[in-house]
Image (spheres, grey):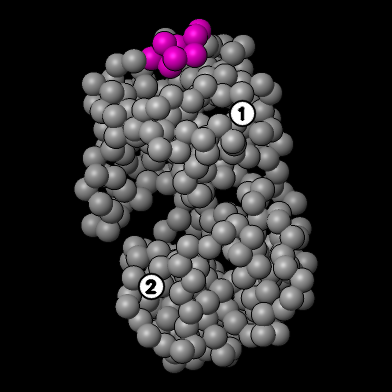
Amino acid sequence: MKVGIDVSQSIYGTGVSDYTIDLVSHLPQSALFGYSLRRQSDLRRLFPTSKIYPFPPVAMHYLWNKLHILTPETLIGPIDVYHSSDWAQAPSGAKKVTTVHDLAPFLYSQETSSQIISVHTARMKWVVKECDAIICVSRNTESDLHHLFPSTVSRTIVIPEALPSRFLLKPASYKMKAKSYLLAIGTRQPRKNILRLISAFLKYSPTEKLVIIGENSLSLSQPSITFTGYVSDQSLVNYLANAVCFIYPSIYEGFGLPILGAFHHKIPVACSDIPVFHETAGTAALYFDPLSEKSIAAGISDAINSKTKLVKLGTRQLNKYSWQKTAEETMKVYQSLC
């Protein structure tokens, strides 16, 4: 059985990138291929044996999602299974598998760019019409998919992700101000709920400082709040491992990989009381109402005060996930189609 896997999205530093890199590294030898106009060298560094083409993503969106021409077989030869990326769905004579990480462009269209909505709408048209199997990274994502695209019900399989390998870096040996800061990861989308977290911190926080991995798109100037901007994987791990608590206040996510990173580095987690985080974190986090500032602050305090218990539970919860298991379950999907 020859499996062709599109690895194009591995270079963007996202959860989808983590998924692609770590899944492929645990699968048996596959026919890997990808495309990028400006970052071909980055793809080749990640996947030295893959076939990389100098095609811009916009062009591949047009060829695959719009015109729906040019098969992967044209690029890499005959294959039995084609596993598409999260960005483009090519036509193929092989059995087709894709992974759906979240449905945010459809559920939160008001905070998603028109370009991204256009891309995902065009791609999902072909996914719904042609894919033989659709892997969802959580039961919550599967439920969203069934709600939005009912005809997919008989073709979905839930296969959880695992701890991204970049979180395995060892943190720097120094301690940042005796663990006196809270840590969050945020972007400008309202569903990330960073503004409400900031308000809760300023009114009720038990700590001196809040560090947010991400850009200061709010133009906020507060000495007790730091926006880091882009950080390297090493810096991300340093911030995470030296925090007093990791906070995940999102209203919607597809899985919540940073929670596993906090578990690995033995940091207590306080997160939103939403179904997907209960899947990911189980009993190993303190949950709060993401729409209530008082609840957010109380959840953070409880998590800090329950550190010993939460760290122990977090280690146990983390052991439920492994990329080897994810790869084995994915291989079963491939084999079931051939």
Pointer 1 or 2: first along the chain: 1
Looking at the image, residue 127 sits to the left or right of residue 299; the answer is: left
Q: Quadrant of residue 217?
A: bottom left
Q: Is the residue 48 above or below the residue 21 in the image?
A: above
Q: Amino acid at mark 2?
A: Asn
Label ID, residue 48: 1
Magenta region: 71-78
Q: What percent of the width, then of the height, locates residue 53?
A: 43, 24
Label ID, residue 216: 2
Circle 2 crowding by C-alpha within 10 Å: few under 14, some 14–19, many from 20: some
Q: CA distance from mark 1 to mark 2?
A: 36 Å
Secondary structure of the residue carrying numbered label 2: loop
Q: Residue at horizontal 71%, vertical 56%?
A: 169
Q: What percent of the width, then of the height, locates residue 98?
A: 46, 30
Query: Is residue 97 visible from the viewing direction of this image?
Result: no
Circle 1 crowding by C-alpha within 10 Å: few under 14, some 14–19, many from 20: few
Q: Residue at horizontal 32%, vertical 28%?
A: 60
Task: Say how many tags the image has.
Answer: 2
Q: Amino acid at mark 1?
A: Pro
Q: Residue at horizontal 29%, vertical 16%?
A: 69
Label ID, residue 58: none
Which quarter shows the N terminus?
A: top right
Residue 107 vs residue 178, the one in the foreground:
178
Q: What percent of the width, then of the height, locates residue 24?
A: 62, 32
Secondary structure of the residue carrying numbered label 1: loop
**Magenta residues, dominant SS class:** helix
